[in-house]
Image (spheres, helix red, strand yellow):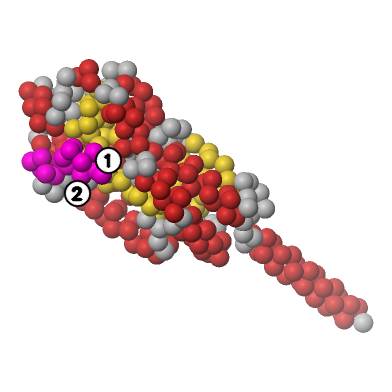
Amino acid sequence: METLMTSRYFLRTALTMAAACLALSAHSQEFPPKKTITMVVGFAAGGAADTGARIIAKKLGENIGASVVIDNRAGAGGNIAHQYTAQGPADGSLILFGSVGPLTIAQHMMKLPYDPVKDLSPITMGVNFPNVLVVGAQTGIKTFADFIAYTKKNPGKLDFASTGPGSASHLAGELLNDMAKIDTVHVPYKGGAPALQDLLGGRVAAYYSTLSTSLPHIETGKLIPLASTGSQRLTALPKIPTIAESGYPGFSATNWYAFVASSKVPKPVMDRWNTELVKVLKSPDVVEALNSHGLSPLPGTRDDLAKYMEKETATWGRIIRERKITME
């Protein structure tokens, strides 16, 4: 009898534990999570990443009926935000508007406290866009040809801002240094907004900027656009040439932001995030708002993003090794 009672006790205990585990599993896969949703951005408020994230977050919150807040965690070219997300909760309440630098470039230039492939899981591509090389009006440089001529005559005298070490704006400058055989000096910032502030203040000469960051100041004449870093001219600046067509064929340094989350988040939750974010990125009002800032939405599958990141990682790794690009 005692043995039978003991067996029944252990059976009840096992069933209770199993039920608790199932309840916990179901809770961890709730969508949306029963808490405020945090969308992390790796750059300071006011830059392109922040602008795009806020447009997307507003529509996302409306669609899923939850509060979505932006958390700007600037520093180290966006790596701080990516590390924070990699170590984030497993319930899916924290997602990251990740960037090309920390996801595919930085690992070739420094030892990271996180693994972009193992610790972060892809959701969907967000937006992509070329940068535009701009200089302050006080430099006296009017064209891209002027820029090249000045830098060749004055090696090491002209500096350029970036959103941080290993960022797309950093690599664009390093690529031009190599292809044009010039020597411009890299000055990293914690995002587009502080870089722009020093550019306008004359504390740095040039910047490979997003269009949304620099366009208002281009229109007032405070900044001079010289060339864009993509394969085609910018629609908003049709008279400004690409670097590729200005004597350096093959030059391309396109920037992009994509949504990722901690790899601890269950697959069903990640799949739902893909569904909801793709829906937002296809919304006509969101497309229009993003396009007005020079950002092109590119929603896709989780697998599409994983393959694209793998390709970008290989491409930038080869370029960094071949051109011996460093963090300086």
Query: In the image, is residue 236 part of the stretch drawn in magenta?
Result: yes
Residue drawn 41% across the image and 40% down it:
49
Residue 78 figure quarter: top left
For the residue pair 302 and 54, the one nearer the viewer reads as 54
Report the side of 120 relative to 156 (left or right): right
Calculate the distance from the C-alpha at mark 2 to the C-alpha at mark 1.
15 Å
Report the side of 147 relative to 277 (left or right): left
Q: Residue furthest right?
A: 1
Amino acid residing under circle 1: Ala
Q: Is residue 325 above or below residue 197?
A: below
Query: In the image, is residue 308 part of the stretch drawn in magenta?
Result: no
Residue drawn 67% across the image and 64% down it:
26
For the residue pair 189 and 280, the one nearer the viewer reads as 280
Residue drawn 55% across the image and 65% down it:
268
Could you tell me if residue 79 is visible in this image?
A: no
Could you tell me if residue 247 is visible in this image?
A: yes
Residue placed under numbered mark 2 in the picture:
231
**Which is the main secondary structure of the residues drawn in magenta?**
loop
Q: Is residue 102 above or below residue 92?
A: above
How packed mark 2 is, by other alpha carbons closer than 10 Å (few <14, some 14-19, many 20 or more), is: some
Residue placed under numbered mark 1 in the picture:
236
Q: Earlier in the sequence, mark 2 or mark 1?
A: 2
Q: Position of residue 229 (x, y in %)?
A: 22, 42
Q: Position of residue 277 (x, y in %)?
A: 49, 56
Count up the numbered dots. 2
